[in-house]
Image (tube, rainbow, N blue to C red):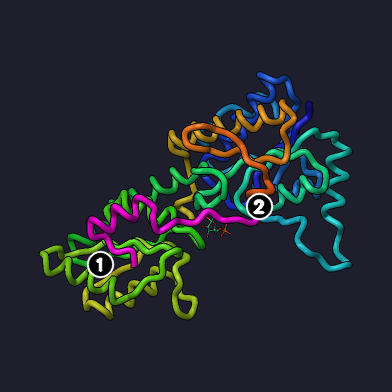
Amino acid sequence: MKIGILTSGGDCPGINATIRGVCKTAINHYGMEVYGIRSGFRGLIDNDIVPLTNKELSGLLNLGGTILGTSREKPFKKRSSASIDKPALILKNIQDLQLDCVVCIGGNGTQKTANKLTQAGVNVVSIPKTIDNDIWGTDISFGFDSAVTIATEAIDRLHSTASSHQRVMVIEVMGHKAGWIALHSGMAGGGDVILIPEIPYNIHNIGNTIIERLKKGKTYSIVVVAEGIQTIDGKKAAEYIAQEIEYETGIETRETVLGYIQRGGSPTAFDRNLATRMGGHATELIANGLFGRMVALQGDKIGSIPLTEVAGKLKLINENNDLIVQGKRMGICFG
Ligand code: F6P
């Protein structure tokens, strides 16, 4: 069999480990031929495709980013009549190359496109990739553990300034619609207030929590916010919350936006192994002719789910999440 592999959407720790997992299994175990498609779906439009052999696949396990490059190209997005017919070009290129399957590694946008590609008649297997952990159908996506680890270390470090200067430190982490990184790093980093897009907040509750802490002799507080919490005037989440807290409490407050550092560099051991397992499973699906499916972590097992069930959905945090329930019992403010 001849397979193509692409990486699409934001980069994230563990992509290269996944490419390695897919391709080494495909070449060494199943005797497949593998092609790397450059810059996400753009590579399928431009026919920017290179053969991958064991040589290109060495040294990838701990390497950040993606050796194939990525883009946010959405070939099935509505286009003006004058523009090129991207889906038609993609189908032609896949046919010319005689690819038996395309492996798509990516986040929610990628899963949608992978589903459209399946509907257009292409054999597709996809793998969930995002630090945001918001892909429906998988308990965890690779990249999430690395991002949480980085954010937790940042929160640990911010404690020094918070306690030394008796300040409130606000840290903004990624997550537009889902607050998984904020919840997990906030809890692991000992946050006193954790704000996620799924739970509307009340600034007076946040102020009261910080004042109550002060009354108990806790002269500093750590506030972890997801970038997607609703703010007035579209302000940056951390900036807005920091201003409001200072106004509400009179305590000196500073903000830090963690940004792309969360997506950069080496994956954790957990993510490397998840990536390897997911990559291997994707190849198994191909070998068994099971297409139109996304690989998924379900409990402690790797399985798969039809792309039709994944596309267009988001995995958000439920208020009954055990970290939230436990956090509330311990006095952490969630808004
Ligand atoms: O990959 C998801 C994500 O990390 C979001 O949390 C973030 O807002 C977004 O990517 C930003 O990525 P870019 O600036 O590359 O579009």
Q: Is residue 247 above or below residue 279?
A: below
Does mark 1 have its CB less than 8 Å from ligand 1? no
Q: Which mark is residue 311?
A: 2
Q: Which mark is residue 30?
A: none
Q: In this view, does 3 lie above or below 241?
A: above
Secondary element type, mark 1: strand
The furthest residue to the front: 320
Indicate the amino acid at tag 2. Answer: Ala
Decide which of tag 2 and tag 1 comes sooner along the chain. 1
Indicate the amino acid at tag 1. Answer: Val
Q: Which residue is drawn at 34% across and 61% down?
A: 194
Magenta: predominant secondary structure element? loop
Q: Is 308 on the left or on the right of 196, as rendered? A: right
In this view, the mark in front (2 or 1): 2
**Ligand 1 positioned in quadrant:** bottom right
What segment carries the magenta color?
A: 311-335
Q: In this view, does 157 lie above or below 38?
A: below
